[in-house]
Image: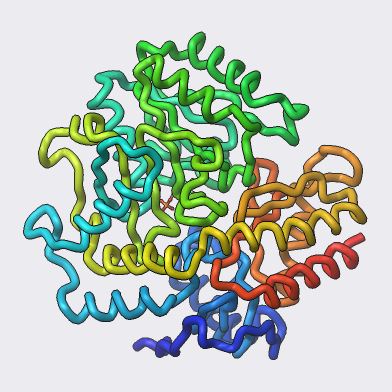
Amino acid sequence: MSTNTPTPGGPSLPQERRLVTAIPGPKSQELQARKTAAVASGVGTTLPVYITAAGGGVLVDVDGNSLIDLGSGIAVTTVGNSAPRVVQAVQDQVAAFTHTCFMVTPYAGYVEVAEALNRLTPGDHEKRTALFNSGAEAVENAVKIARTHTKKTGVVVFDHAYHGRTNLTMAMTAKSMPYKSGFGPFASDVYRAPLSYPFRDDQLDGATAAARAIDVIEKQVGADNLAALVIEPIQGEGGFIVPAAGFLPALQDWCTANNVVFIADEVQTGFARTGAMFAVDHDQVVPDIIVTAKGIAGGLPLSAVTGRTEMMDSAHVGGLGGTYGGNPLACAAALAVLETIEADGLVDRAAKIGSLMTSRLHALQERDSRLGDVRGRGAMIAVELVKAGTTEPDADLTKQVAAAAHQAGVVVLTCGTYGNVLRFLPPLSISDELLEDACNVLDDVFAATK
Ligand SMILES: *Cc1c(COP(=O)(O)O)cnc(C)c1O
């Protein structure tokens, strides 16, 4: 029997940080004990507070604590949890019909999402879209499409890349622990090239970093064998690495000249997150294919592959799809998300959040040389932590700071190949007051972990 009666969330929840128990509180601890006894241990939890309601910039737990959300469920609830338009659209849709399978008897919502993505994604060329459930599934389909289009098989990905947890995307993901270790053998014909990582490659300029990557690709794979180059315009799990200016355009030019499909994995960066609708917009890059998920539907499972018509239509009829892909509830939510981004000016809001948080973090960095690098774009912000005054990664400090922030009621996430990056992905519905409060907590936490 369910003990989890839903309570109303959304932006009308009190927007405050309020702790009434230790974190996690007794009810969360009880649930965590049941989780341990019922859920496979491979499914970990960053912060075991059990949520009953969320919205605006807060998460409310079963013990009555209200925490500041700087994670958005990993860049998913960009428009806020239970955003009003999303709630209304999903309620209307769930009462009308829940599923028919678009591949059997279709419905308008799917077509409308495809039309919107064709319009909103970079480039004014003719496009087509296909919908799926998860980011990894969309990445896999983008590779399938690139292979049928080019009649080649190789795939190039980058150092520190994260593309998912399915078999092909595990091969494409860089980091072994926890994503790959023990789960092989992996899909073949996937090759890794060096990234532009300004903090760790002596600020190598973008053109030089691209030439270095292209040299590896040409020598170790060869354009004649290569179907696609897949890249996150700003790496997510790999550490919020913003490549040097010119890196992405040079790679795109090389792809175009060599009949290699340039695929932007915007699963984490998409939909206003970076202060642009898509992160490639910052570099005026127009990908052949763009992969989206996470922020697309306010928390309902949906992903998409959008690309040039001649590429997208290279797969035979019936070659793309899936039972749930473009589920009607998820499509209704996505349309409401896109409307919310526009109506609430969330692209600008992301940029504003970015300048507020980065100026606070830069001020902290002035006082504390363990903050090696403050970087990101818009509301996708990270701090890379190092041993004071060096570039040596400090994963222990990162764990300590994250744990202390959690204790103080601020949900932060970590990432990075070296486990030394604190990342901030606030919902764009968060208030300036909550952001300032969260930054004050971070100031205190760093001061206390001297
Ligand atoms: C999260 C993520 C994925 C995988 O998405 P899932 O929905 O978890 O399968 C792929 N690429 C990037 C860049 C991601 O951040």
Q: Is 33 positioned to the left or the right of 148 in the image?
A: right
- 411 above or below 190? below
In the image, what residue occupies the spot 36% across and 53% down? 134
- 388 above or below 85? above
In the image, what residue occupies the spot 55% across and 24% down? 193
Q: Which quadrant of the view contains residue 205? A: top right
Instruction: Residue 180: tell me if it is visible.
Output: no
What is the x, y in percent for residue 343?
Answer: 43, 69
Q: Is 446 positioned to the left or the right of 72 in the image?
A: right
In the image, what residue occupies the spot 69% across and 86% down? 18
Query: For this rendering, which residue is in front, 289 or 318?
Result: 289
Instruction: Residue 173: tell me if it is visible.
Output: yes
Residue at the top extreme of this rendering: 219
What is the x, y in percent for residue 80?
Answer: 49, 72
In which quadrant of the rendered image does the N terminus lie? bottom left
Colouring: rainbow
